[in-house]
Image (tube, coloured by chain):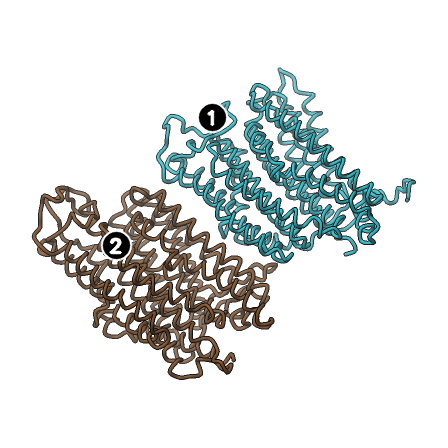
Chain colours: A brown, B cyan
Amino acid sequence: MEFLNSWVLPIILFWPAVAALLIFITNDERMIKWGSILASLLPLGLSIYLLAAYDQGVGGMQFVVDIPWIEPLNASFALGADGLSVPLIFLTTLLSTLSIYYSAGTIRYRVKEYFLMFQLLELSMLGVFMALDYVLFYVFWEISLVPMYLLIGIWGGKNRGYASIKFFIYTLVGSVAMLLAILGTYYATGTFNILDAAAAKPFMNLPADQALLLSSLAFWGFFLGFAFKVPSFPFHTWLPDAHTEAPTAGSVILAGVLLKLGAYGFLRIILPTFPSTSAYWSMWIVALGAIAIVYGAFVCIAQTDLKRLIAYSSVSHMGYVMLGIGAAASAMGRNPDGTSMLNDPAVFDSAAMAINGALLQMFMHGIITGALFLLVGVIYERAHTRALDKFGGLGTLTPYYYGFFLVAGFASLGLPGLAGFWAEFFTFRGAFALVPLWAAFGVIGIVMTAVYILWRIMQSLFFGEYDSTKLDHWTTVTGEHADGPTDMVAFEKLTLWPLIIGMFVLGFFPMLVLNYFNSFSVGMLESIRTLF
Amino acid sequence: METTLDLSTLNLAVVLPELTLIVFAILVMAADVFATPKNPAPRQWTPWIALAGVVAAAIVNLSVSGREVTLFQGAAILDKFAVGLNYIILLATGLGILLSVKYIPRINKQVGEYYALTLLTATGMMMMGAALDLITLFLALEIFSLALYILSGLNRTSPRSTEAAIKYFLLGAFSSAFFAYGGALIYAGTGTTQYYGIAQVTAAGLANTPLLYAGIALLVAGFGFKVSLVPFHSWTPDVYQGAPTPVTAFMSVGTKAAAFAAFFRVMLVALPFSYGAWSMPLALLAVITMAVGNFAALQQRSLKRMLAYSSIAHAGYILTALAGGAAEGADAALFYLFTYAFMNIGAFAVVMALEEMGAEDAMQDRAKGLGKTHPIMAFLMAIFMFGLSGMPPLAGFYGKVLLFEAAVAGGMIWLAIAAVAFTAVGAVYYLRVIANMYFADPVDESADEVNRSLPLDVGLAIAVAGTILVGVFPGFWMNAFQQSMALFGG
């Protein structure tokens, strides 16, 4: 146990690299597919072990590994996991396994490269969630671009060249801004360790105006890096293109995990390292979040392509995350008498709720939108179109599909009893206490979410009479000719069941993940409260 | 001033790596003499003799490292910086020779001269880093430049190659004139050509400022030609495209490394006290260079021209570290050029393999579908492209981090911001090559031959191994290039 606890993170992290190497030397496609699925089970199993072994009573960083790496740069190979990262590591491994399993049934060309890229993608995402060193963090952050770029570019839709380069360049612009912020933070603190830098509170020892200027520069550098990834309005324009063109499993990972890297950065780096500066600029985060919620929802209503619609719904849903983060940041400043605003228990609770809401939204959105993109993939493999007006009346013909879509759709619009509800509840509970006007504005988005889920998706796809003249070319999922829409087959059901079950389980027992998140948010807010 | 020659100061160890190369250059020529139409064997040995020379020089270089000695009454120096540059030049030369083995006999029968000239070029380049006197510097510059003019015109049957040589020669002659004139004006302003002497005079405030500044300006222009800074860059794309590809690969790294090494040493050792006068002009030159290099590279259909403009952009990145004025900048530049040698020569090697027989260039279209037809070549090219674009964990990333860190350390935060912004622009054209290779279908099925040979494969293997391994474990090499330059009074 002792041995496992001290090495579990590197094992989870580098196992995909081993798997990638094995895929590289294998030429048999069946073996590659099944090998990838089997290989992905080990990180999944170990991340469940992480959930169990993480000691919430102690809290803080656990399973820490810290090995000198690039000594001239003062960069070390430092990994760790806390209440923030443990559930996200689990989400990553779960969605990776499901995506790989689903891809084994749908990817037909350049199989070897595809599964190799997927392993690299998993490696990079896990690395971001585990890294405790800025250089290491940045390295994994950048690596994650490459496999996703190739996944979209090689296995994507018609407009894949444009979408993939747009994805790459937009995110790269953000990350180079972050690189400068990292260098600035390094010069201010003398360390690349993320936790030490946060404890040192860079720039705060300078005169007030200089401190504000320099820490704001660093804040905005990090902000750009993370906001492009989230993506926050108005940096979101790459997302609909990337999602629409990406292969199904690529979209699942993109929406399910990659977007969370951005939100994770806000909570791991920006808020703990620059609390006062975050408070100073918090209204920008709040406003961008609230606008994203409403704008994203309205744009969804106007979509005619099912996948593009779900993509915009991600913009809207990640807006909740930004709203929660911004609301909590607004409570990190000082009262006029110089004491911390968090000294007021009511403010502290609301800030903690806002962060918990944001974190729940990250986790739940990963599950729900992952499921939605898989469901889009299911119909696309059969109809080879995603135009909403080509469908209708599928409810009676494909009842299994209908049922799954119904659960995922209702979870997405926040129906109580399903996972999405708690995320919205906590976010708005926290945000209303701290930033009431923007929270009230954001509520419009909740209503509009119901509109696009029920009216645009459910009604277009499932209600009414099936009209065979709208779309005359149907196939089965394996590509053989079919006379009409066929229901889901075993491997598709098996991919989706864990997510559907998760929506119900977390709908009734949100504490299963909330406890981890709460230990993080309370710990972080407490350390900021005691600053002043 | 000491005028009598004191033999005890004649410590030849300082130039032993250069002397080794000269000896092997003579051996190459001697072997070439014995080749007859009936017995061409000695001529076929020449590349291997040259390669042995490179390896021998590297070993000698290793044996003289760790010292800090000056020679010839302060005309040359051997310090960590010079040793580091020698490694980079020798690496570039070795890779260049590997690329040449199959290629050069196809375009010119005089292979012996080719390898002798290559070794002499390398000698001049290595002296550039060791020079501690403007006259030594000028001699070194002329040695390698003259040899390169010949090398770039080696393909006498190709009008493009001849054009490249003429262009390079004419503009190079101009730059030499600028250079000599700049040195003369600095001499007029300070009364000495030695770096330490110039630093002493300027530190004491005894220099004739107008003459000195005019001299600095001309010197910067001279260096600007050699490292291809905008607006002195116009020869670069034409020469890179027209010269035989192995020569382009070698000179793109070697010239840049040598000229930048000398540039850093002149500015940081001889002219640190005029920092206020040259830092801002250099910063502006860096911005223009990065802008023109990156945006022009976006437009190129020829792979070699694209790499030429990309090399201009890289000159801009390196210049940001010099404009910062910090001593770490020199270390950063060395590390960067070291990684650049692997990535850039690797990229040229792939382009060379893609060239059709007899042509001296490959178009972007040629890369289309390479991921399907030649997965290994495409993979290598992808690694080099990602490396050049600065993607971690490949070697180019840490080089860029060090460069921009040096700019920040020198207080030029805005310059670092501009540089990273241009890095993002640069990613577009590197990615376009990758997109062509992997996302597009082959244009012409019949033209899918690639020219590979064992030496080329070895060169590619070294280049890709360096790009990846220096990226994953950069610590050792950063140490090797740390606190490298013997500064004035330091």
Q: Chain of mark 2?
A: A
Between A508 and B194, the one nearer to me in the picture: B194
* Residues flagged by tags 2 and 1 on a common chain: no
Which of the two residues, B284 or A523, is positioned nearer the viewer here?
Answer: B284
Residue A130 percent coordinates (x, y): 44, 64
Instruction: Classify B155 as above or below A195.
Output: above
Nearer the observer, A389 or B328: A389
Q: Nearer the viewer, mark 2 or mark 1?
A: 2
Query: A283 or A488: nearer the eye?
Result: A283
Residue B188: quarter of image: top right
Instruction: Please give the name of the residue rendered at 16% of the width and 49% of the height, measured from the top-left corner.
Output: A389
| Disc 1 crowd, CA 10 A, few/some/many (<14, 14-19, 20+) | some
Q: Which residue is mark 1?
A: B356
Q: Which residue is mark 2?
A: A309
Taking the view exactly as shown, the residue that stands out farthest to the top is B38
Q: Position of residue B10 (x, y in %)?
A: 84, 42
**Residue B13 visible in the snapshot:** no
Q: Hey, what amino acid is under mark 1? A: Glu
Relative image position of residue A426 (x, y in whole percent): 31, 74
Can residue B170 be seen here? The reply is yes
Q: Which part of the image, by quadrant, shows the N terminus of chain A?
A: bottom left
Q: Is residue A240 left or right of residue B256?
A: left
